[in-house]
Image (tube, grey):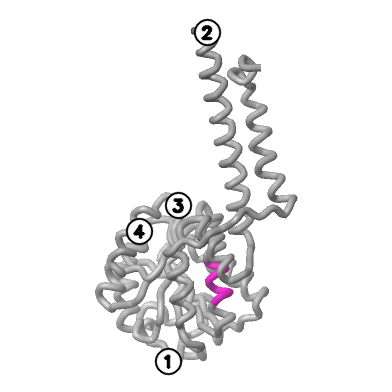
Amino acid sequence: MLEKLMSIDRRIIFILVALAVILPTLIPVSMPISVSEPTQKLYDYIETIPAGGTIMLVFDYGPASLAELNPMARAIMKQCFAKDIRVIGLTLYAVGTTMGSTLIQEVVEETGAVDGEDYVFLGFRPGLELVILGMGTDITSIFDRDYNGKPLSEIPMMQNVTNYDQVDLLVDLSAGSLTEAWITYANVQFNLQIAAGVTGVIISQMYPYLQTGQLVGLIPGIAGAAEYERLIEAPAKGTLWINIESFVHLLIIGLVVIGNIAFFIQRRREE
């Protein structure tokens, strides 16, 4: 038995991993989810925004990161629409245009939000720092029309929104360093309150901004997405994917433990 464990066919491990992914998808098994402080802070901050308030939701990511960031965006939009908070969507990342426009339409179909009254999607403009700084003075100087080509002057929810002064919070969903650009140019220059949702690989570099108060909240990776879904009481893909990830991690830990036990027993017998 020990020899078999030490020389197990890798195809068996592949099958076990496949089962660990498939079974939680087919069988509704829910792992316990505890909400981290950074996620709770963002949720609480949005809860304090009064009805009729406005947030900017920035889709600074592409297809490679949608598994982690799409669930965050969906949960935030559902919370905002339920509280009658208006959402201005945009992106500083060219391929983020598709991410934002597609996801917004999916959430609109679920919630019944109205284009131009509950939300507007501005799309993409090149320039990064110039875009951020320009909107701080006058949004229409950068985005004179929405993604569908409609002038902002004809969009009801934008009538009284001219710059960051009328925006209660900006949430940047990012797979890279663009959150730091928003902090540098929007928070420092215009005192715009900023929160972020990021992929797992860049979570650590966001914590210093939490400590300085330059981020009012942070959704950390797919675990944070599942936490946010729990807070809004609407489990979706974030919860499903963290369950799958948890089962795979447990399988890997189990295999490592069994392998080490078998190794040490075999070595002792040889000695």
Residue contact between numbered discs 4 and 3, judged by CB atoms under 8 Å: no
Q: Secondary structure at mark 4?
A: helix
Circles 1 and 3: CB distance less than 8 Å?
A: no
Q: Position of residue 10 (x, y in %)?
A: 62, 25
Q: Write the residue at 62% across / 70% down.
A: 233
Q: CA distance from mark 2 to mark 1?
A: 80 Å
Q: Residue type at mark 2: give it.
A: Glu
- Residue type at mark 4 is Met
Query: Which residue position holds label 3?
Result: 200
Q: Earlier in the sequence, mark 2 or mark 4?
A: 4
In this view, 161 is above or below 268:
below
Q: Nearer the viewer, mark 2 or mark 4?
A: 2
Q: Quadrant of the N terminus?
A: top right
* Quarter of the rendering containing residue 2: top right
Residue corresponding to mark 4: 206
Q: CA distance from mark 1 to mark 4?
A: 32 Å
Please state which amino acid type lies under the numbered disc 3.
Gly
User: Which residues make up the magenta segment?
Assistant: 73-79
> What residue is shown with label 1?
160
